[in-house]
Structure formats: C-alpha cells, structure tokens
Amino acid sequence: MKRLLVLAAVLALGPLAAPGTASAGGGCHGDYVPDAKGSQVTFSQLCMNPMVTRIPVKGTVTWTNEDELPHNLVGAAYLWGTDGDIRPDESVTFRFSSDGTFPYACTIHAGMLGAVVVGSGIRAADANRHDSPVSLVSVAS
C-alpha cells in the first residue's frame, strides 16, 4: 500500500515537468522504479537514481548532478527545492524533519521524477501546512 501511495505522489508531479527531453525518466527509461534506503541521489543519464529514497526523520538527502547538463530540484507544489540550476558536478543537500512523502521533479527535463519517503512516509494530519519540514543544508561545487 505504501508503494502505491509513493507512486501516486510521484505521478502527481507530472504537471510540474516542463516540456523537455522525451527520454527523461525517474525510473531510468524502463519499467523498474529504483527504491532504496540511503542519503544519496544522482542525476545520471536524465534519471533520478534511486527514484524513491527512504530516510529516517531528521535525515538528509544529497543530490549530485553526474550529467553534463544542468538540472533543478522542485518539490511538489513548489514548497521546497532549489532556486536555480544544479550544474554538472554540483551537489545540494536538504534535511527532512518530519514523517512524510516528499515528491520532486527536475522541471527542466520532463519525466525526471522522484520521492523522498521520511520515516513512516505518512505526515501527521495535524502537521502545520505552513511550516516546511524540508530545509536546505548545503550547496557544493
């Protein structure tokens, strides 16, 4: 059931993705959706790897651009993400301070989607919707 919720959240990001390279995709151009525990995601060959990243509450995730072109990182409803592009060999790190599922996309390349699942993956119903549970930690070149 949780996998279906994560997939639904990721698919809901489709409207965030601007027209771009048709071959881009979060699942790396196939029917497999990479799903892993860990704190590292790469932009590689116009894919998010892994597409679904699972971390504990208060954990961080670092995205590193291994492609030769820029990407960006935009959270659902534009509630979190980068202000500009993540250039080749650059990294950006965000901290996730509460349970929840946080879908994101590269809006430069259609289909580059992913999600961070924090803790149980379910955000408390009484969570203040105005306080972002996601904060920028660092940007590195």
Image (tube, rainbow, N blue to C red):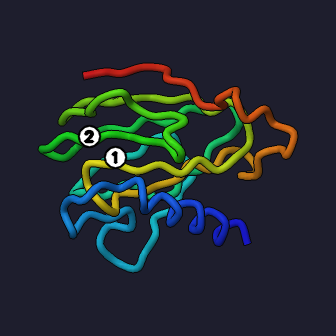
Say which amino acid is labelled 2: Asn
What residue is at 87 percent from the left and 39 percent from the top?
126
Percent of width and height locating residue 77: 53, 44
Looking at the image, the residue that sits furthest to the right is: 126
What residue is at 59 percent from the left and 31 percent from the top?
134
State the quadrant of the N terminus. Answer: bottom right
Percent of width and height locating residue 95: 57, 28
Tell me if residue 123 comes above or below residue 14 in the rendering. Answer: above
| Horizontal relation, residue 68 to residue 96: left or right | left
Say which amino acid is labelled 1: Thr
Graded by Cα atoms within 10 Å as few (under 14), some (14 to 19) or many (20 or more), the crowding at tag 2 reads many
Foreground residue, 72 or 95? 72
Q: Earlier in the sequence, mark 2 or mark 1?
A: 1
Read off the residue under disc 2: 65
Could you give the CA–CA distance between mark 2 and mark 1, rounded to whole angstroms?
A: 6 Å
| Horizontal relation, residue 94 to residue 65: left or right | right
What residue is at 30 percent from the left and 58 percent from the top?
47
Foreground residue, 77 or 113? 77
Tell me if residue 125 comes above or below residue 90 in the rendering. Answer: below
Tell me if residue 99 comes above or below residue 27 in the rendering. Answer: above
Are the residues at dot 2 and dot 1 in contact (C-beta closer than 8 Å)? Answer: yes
Read off the residue under disc 1: 42
Graded by Cα atoms within 10 Å as few (under 14), some (14 to 19) or many (20 or more), the crowding at tag 1 reads some
SS for callout 1: strand
State the quadrant of the C terminus. Answer: top left
Residue 59, picture quadrant: top right
State the count of labels.
Answer: 2
What residue is at 61 percent from the left and 62 percent from the top?
6
SS for callout 2: strand
